[in-house]
Image (cartoon, rainbow, N blue to C red):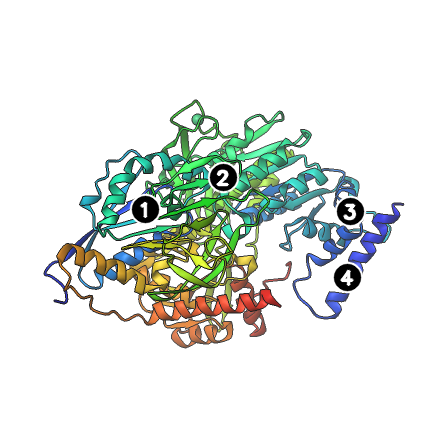
């Protein structure tokens, strides 16, 4: 028995128990933090007991959804999984997840046996070097690289440098699962000694000529600019370097014949056939491809992949539907301009006439990013002709209202930072049967959900959070 | 004279495809909105590296900030455009340069290894990067300026030092400012403003947007032009929310 690990596990568990007894929420990271202080090797020692190996999913957007889809596939395949699905994707959060599965001696106890279990870890971009070092993953999926909360992560170039650092450590026998459509992600294959599995969208019908905020402008190899034959959104598309030979690699796992519906999407993956999933938006098809590619790398059979994709449940605030006093609230979490622009395009594509009721919620706590200037990179203008009623909420509701004013939206029915009064205002201006799109930042969503739960909204969301 | 008949202004947006990191597009959106609300046609020309640029063809110039790598790439092009731009600004051309744009409007940017990126010297200042171990200056800013209270958010690694006699844009009430030492923020010369503040700057500080528009109109149509006021309730509310946030966070940091 590793006494230091056992002490760390027990200290972590005690800390978790104490926060639960005190009724403090948000304690998912604390047990791991305490354990890592007591034994900095805890993540490595616990994680490496997972006999089927570890898989990491990182990237600016889509980590959570990709991980959820993969977890659903693995459940269909009967693979026991330890997954940090509660949201904390820093090293401490992963350690918390593992602690919860560990006994007092520090041995993992997983149904089906730790020897046969797989670790599935959604990994914060900046935590990748530590996670890759400690968990020695058998596969790492990179979804995309966008600008995100520059006050926390620094520039996009800084994140790219962190990723290269993570991959420069003693070459693990890992497979890189890379988004062929994102040149910043594709670049990670350069110099990688191990196998690479590419995924990408192959449906030109969804390509756009609208430039949006582009974060990958120059080729690192030669300094040339990227040119696009077709672009799906931002810098995601059929890219090629104008200065050298680099170009979008042919995907090993591709999505063809994509069709998007208000609450589902269908697409064909050569070799697997047509898949249907209860999430929509081109960006979610890309997330599904990342999960399918990972599943293929792990050797999961086609039937389990199709059933897993079809059975995935929306993650916390990602296209969740909530019944509230007869109104249907659909929640679209937006953490950064790229994510928000995809949601804007989804709402634009699925709204007929001037019928959109939208509550946009902007908060500025640490987890949201304290700098709200990113809202000016979001194309709210596209929705202006479609908006019937709107509300501005979140801790920076007034900033949100100003952004909407300058985007040409009608004057908001209410500008209300308080989630209680915001919900009241939504109720007052709508009638049963109405639909309202809620577009919140992360903590604005947490605040709103807490209030919805308090009022007994007819949903069982949170049951597996 | 309130406004001439069919007023029109031409805005040059320098390097919009790369110098756009912190919502700088909001400044263009604000200028357009506040012009259109008064019936002023605003034509926006995007000027990128390699494009011909004659400042005499424009009434306003705007430049935002970029990542280090991007800034280096456009610096050479900006230096080529520099003499004409500096001369026009000396002649009263209104300009707003934010963050990286502000740095390049100074004499030079010196990186932590002593490498120099030349600027165009609109402002009498230089910027030095103290090295990768120094903290970036990140956070809310409140300034006292001759346009009144100004709010925004700063995020910069470089420290900017004004030469003797160079006016700042404002004095720091909350935040770091040019270098976290001397209390100065930004720079101002004639109708040109340089600042680290994004947020974006102009939507929440409409007095500055209007000052730029008015200076541009007067330069083109004569000194008796006046701007009709707009309903700025939403702008004022957002300004106050930002000021309250800055106040609250600086109190929290002090505790
Ligand atoms: Zn190249």
Q: According to the image, label 2 marks what residue?
A: B111
Residue B74 appears at what percent x and percent y? 37, 37
Q: Nearer the viewer, mark 4 or mark 2?
A: 2
* Quarter of image, ligand 1: top left
Quick one: B253 or A415, which is closer to the camera?
Answer: B253
- Pointer 4 local density, CA inside 10 Å: few below 14, some 14–19, many at least 20: some
Q: According to the image, label 3 marks what residue?
A: A42
- Are the residues under marks 3 and 2 on the same chain? no
Q: Does dot 2 land on a helix, a strand or a loop?
A: loop
Quick one: A263 or B10, which is closer to the camera?
Answer: B10
Quarter of the image where the C terminus of chain A is located: bottom right
Residue A416 appears at what percent x and percent y? 44, 72
Q: According to the image, label 1 marks what residue?
A: B122
Name the N-terminal-most of marks 4 and 3. Answer: 4
Residue A76, image quadrant: top right
Q: Could you tell me how far apart the alpha carbons at marks 1 and 2 are, in whole angstroms?
A: 20 Å
Q: Nearer the viewer, mark 3 or mark 2?
A: 2
Task: Tell me: A113 left or right of A24.
Answer: right
């Amino acid at each position: 028995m590793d006494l230091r690990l056992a002490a760390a596990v027990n200290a972590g568990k005690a800390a978790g128990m104490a926060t639960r007894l005190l009724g403090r929420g948000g304690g998912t990271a604390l047990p791991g933090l305490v354990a890592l202080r007591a034994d900095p090797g805890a993540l490595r020692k616990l994680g490496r007991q997972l006999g089927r190996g570890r898989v990491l999913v990182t990237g600016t957007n889509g980590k959570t959804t990709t991980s959820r889809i993969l977890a659903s596939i693995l459940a269909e395949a009967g693979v026991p999984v330890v997954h940090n699905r509660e949201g904390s994707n820093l090293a401490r959060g992963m350690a918390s997840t593992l602690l919860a599965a560990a006994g007092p001696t520090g041995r993992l106890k997983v149904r089906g046996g730790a020897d046969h279990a797989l670790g599935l870890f959604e990994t914060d971009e900046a935590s990748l070097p530590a996670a890759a070092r400690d968990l020695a993953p058998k596969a790492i999926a990179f979804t995309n690289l966008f600008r995100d909360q520059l006050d926390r992560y620094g520039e996009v170039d800084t994140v790219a440098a962190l990723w290269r650092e993570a991959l420069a450590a003693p070459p693990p026998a890992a497979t890189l699962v890379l988004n062929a459509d994102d040149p910043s992600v594709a670049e990670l294959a350069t110099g990688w000694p191990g196998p690479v599995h590419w995924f990408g969208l192959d449906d030109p019908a969804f390509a756009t000529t609208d430039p949006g905020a582009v974060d990958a402008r120059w080729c690192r190899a030669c300094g040339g600019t990227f040119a696009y034959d077709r672009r799906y959104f931002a810098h995601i598309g059929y890219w090629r370097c104008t200065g050298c030979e680099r170009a979008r690699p042919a995907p090993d796992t591709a999505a063809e014949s994509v069709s998007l519906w208000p609450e589902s999407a269908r697409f064909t993956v050569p070799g697997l056939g047509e898949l249907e999933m209860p999430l929509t938006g081109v960006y979610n098809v890309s997330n599904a491809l990342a999960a399918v590619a990972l599943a293929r790398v792990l050797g999961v059979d086609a039937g389990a992949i199709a059933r897993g994709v079809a059975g995935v449940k929306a993650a916390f605030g990602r296209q969740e539907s909530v019944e509230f006093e007869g109104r249907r609230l659909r929640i679209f979490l937006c953490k950064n301009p790229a994510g928000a622009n995809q949601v804007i395009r989804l709402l634009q594509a699925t709204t007929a006439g001037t019928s959109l009721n939208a509550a946009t919620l902007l908060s500025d706590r640490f987890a949201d990013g304290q700098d709200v200037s990113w809202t000016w990179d979001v194309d709210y203008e596209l929705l202006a002709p479609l908006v019937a009623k709107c509300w501005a909420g979140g801790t920076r509701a007034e900033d949100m209202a100003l952004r909407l004013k300058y985007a040409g939206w009608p004057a908001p029915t209410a500008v209300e930072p308080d989630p209680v009064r915001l919900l009241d205002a939504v109720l007052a201006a709508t009638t049963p049967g109405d639909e309202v799109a809620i577009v919140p930042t992360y903590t604005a969503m947490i605040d709103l959900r807490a209030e919805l739960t308090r009022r007994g909204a007819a949903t069982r969301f949170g049951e597996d959070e | 004279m309130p406004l001439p008949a069919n007023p029109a202004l031409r805005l040059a947006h320098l390097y919009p495809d790369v110098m756009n990191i912190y919502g700088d597009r909001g400044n263009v959106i604000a200028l357009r909105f506040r012009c259109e609300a008064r019936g002023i046609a605003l034509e926006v020309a995007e000027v990128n590296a390699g494009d011909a640029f004659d400042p005499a063809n424009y009434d306003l110039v705007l430049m935002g900030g970029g990542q280090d790598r991007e800034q280096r790439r456009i610096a050479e092009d900006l230096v080529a455009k520099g003499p004409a731009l500096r001369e026009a600004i000396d002649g009263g051309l209104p300009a707003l340069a934010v963050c990286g744009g502000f740095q390049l409007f100074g004499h030079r940017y010196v990186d932590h290894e002593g490498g120099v990126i030349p600027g165009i010297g609109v402002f009498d200042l230089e910027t030095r990067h103290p090295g990768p171990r120094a903290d970036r200056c990140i956070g809310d800013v409140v300034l006292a300026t001759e346009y009144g209270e100004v709010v925004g958010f700063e995020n910069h690694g470089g420290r900017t030092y004004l030469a003797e006699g160079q006016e700042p844009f404002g004095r720091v009430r909350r935040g770091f400012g040019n270098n976290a030492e001397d209390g100065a923020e930004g720079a101002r010369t004639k109708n040109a403003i340089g600042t680290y503040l994004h947020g974006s700057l102009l939507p929440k500080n409409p007095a500055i947007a209007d000052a730029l528009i008015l200076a541009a109109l007067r330069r083109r149509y004569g000194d008796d032009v006046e701007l009709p006021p707009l309903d700025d309730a939403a702008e004022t509310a957002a300004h106050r929310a930002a000021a309250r946030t800055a106040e609250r966070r600086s109190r929290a940091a002090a505790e």
